[in-house]
Image (spheres, coloured by chain):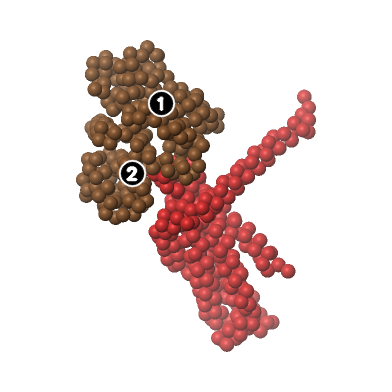
Chain colours: A red, B brown
Amino acid sequence: MRISTVERALPVRRYVGRWSLHVVGHAGRFFMMIVDMFRGFPAWRAWGPEFVEQANSIGYGSLFIVLLISGFAGGVTALQTGYQFTGAYPLYIAGGLIGETVILELGPVMTGLVLAGRVGARIAAELGTMRVTEQIDALESLGRSPVTQLLLPRCLAGLLVIPALVMFSNATGFIVGWVAAKQSLGITNAEFQYGARYFFRSFDLWYSGIKAIFFAIAITAIPCYIGFNTQQGAEGVGRATTQAVVVTSVTILLLDVVLAQVLLGK
Amino acid sequence: MIELRNVSKRFIENVVLDDISLDVKAGETLALLGPSGVGKSVLLKHIIGLIRPDKGDVLVDGLSVPRLKRRELSQLRTRIGYVFQNGALFDSMDVFDNIRLGITNEENYRDDDFAKARVTECLRLVNLSPDVQIKMPAELSGGMRKRVGIARAIAGKPTYLLYDEPTSGLDPVNSDVIDGLIERLQHELGVTSVVVTHDVRGAFRVADRIALLWQAKIRAVGTSDQILASRDEAVQQFLERDFDLEALQGGGKKT
């Protein structure tokens, strides 16, 4: 018996339909979570103490690893610049190249990816465990909003602290890159400063900051959503944690492309 | 008064509750019996609005729980204490802060003196010493966690207390202690209670009435005498599975 084209296409259409409903469902619930956070904003007494704790955990807790990685990123950029420099360009260009690479790309993106792993995984695992051990239900049963008490402080803390971490990362990457360039290229301080100033525009720092804010939203809100909706015990917590890191990392890379096109595209 | 009116709930293809109707009168203790995984906890969560029914209605004090707005539902929940199966204590808080969270009146919650006095009083009610306040949940035994969970549930002076498997995972001695506690709280606080359990002996000890949830339906409801006298096959099977019916008919009932 021959199968018609329509019959052959039916499972594919069903699959696409189900997948679309799935995506729309998640988007709707994610949007409602954000709306709930705005609603909970005036109840600052409920989220204030947790906000301070989370800001400390995200900021101070991540500072060392962020500085370490941005230092390495700045250093490697300088070394590779040295490797590619053949004497065809004036040395001061290295100052501009390292400064711009770190501020526009490496500082925000490296910090974002590191925090997606460190902060995003922690948030998803914490909330997921609270969900499967009924702690979130317990909070609701006491007439308290888990969105206001658990999710809002995490997102606000990230929004405040992650841009600051990105700025620290930029500074560290730049300084280490400078030192490394001096070693690998033999560039003088005056040459490096001239190049860095020549290519620098104040918008570059704004761009880095704007990226950091978008990344901060992704690093906190996505793991909050995934952790909050965890199901099926310990296995579910593991799955939620992995999912949170993967989805957040991919979102950061997508945002990187979109923001570059929107803010830097001509 | 708690009223369930033709409540149905399914999770994907699995029908958990099928056209359930049940009343819990003010001041009484109703034990909801049934085998594990039959949907007893799901039914309990309908009462506090943690799960919405697919069909039917749940009324608490005449208010339709599924139709309440967020703020109204939060308000209603301040009148209901919920004891979770494993305590559901907040890991990051000590016992004092866990119980304090149960104080649902915001002014009282912020008043340190009131909170200290209330937490101590709640610990006394559940037979725990005030020294326990400074411990973290991880430092407590299973029985103590359950009792702290009960203390948190009663901290807000609720009108209703819902117990989700209060004795599961406990040895017989600790189960007896918790059953005694439920009885005592019923007398001292005069609350309306629903106790979800598969422990038949405990149910007969604490409840004024017993309901049996069997294959998504309420198979029998009545006093312990009525349940014991029931000729329903499922009721007989369930009671016999746990213990000697003749021994129970001889004594075990709530007096």
Q: Residues within 10 Å of mark 1 (few under 14, many from 20)?
A: some
Q: Give residue B251's quadrant in the image.
A: top left
For residue A166, which numbered disc appears in the image? Answer: none
B134 w.r.t. B82: above or below: below
A201 w.r.t. B213: above or below: below
Q: Is residue A124 visible?
A: no
Query: Label 1 belongs to which residue?
Result: B23
- On the image, the x and y values in percent for residue B46 come to 45, 34
Q: On the picture, is A206 further left or further right than B161? A: right
Amino acid type indicated by mark 1: Asp
Q: Residue at x 51, y 37 (%)?
A: B67
Q: Nearer the viewer, residue A242 or A162?
A: A162
* Residues tagged 1 and 2 counted as in contact (Cβ below 8 A): no
Q: Residue at x 41, y 57 (%)?
A: A45
Q: On the picture, is B139 further left or further right than A25? A: left
What is the quadrant of the C terminus of chain A in the image? Answer: bottom right
- On the image, the x and y values in percent for residue B157 come to 32, 41
Q: Give residue A17's quadrant in the image.
A: top right
For residue B156, which numbered disc appears in the image? Answer: 2
Q: Nearer the viewer, residue B39 or A106?
A: B39
Name the residue furthest top: B231
Q: Residue at x 57, y 68 (%)?
A: A209
Q: On the picture, is A96 further left or further right than B23? A: right
- On the image, the x and y values in percent for residue A67 come to 48, 69
A145 w.r.t. A209: above or below: above
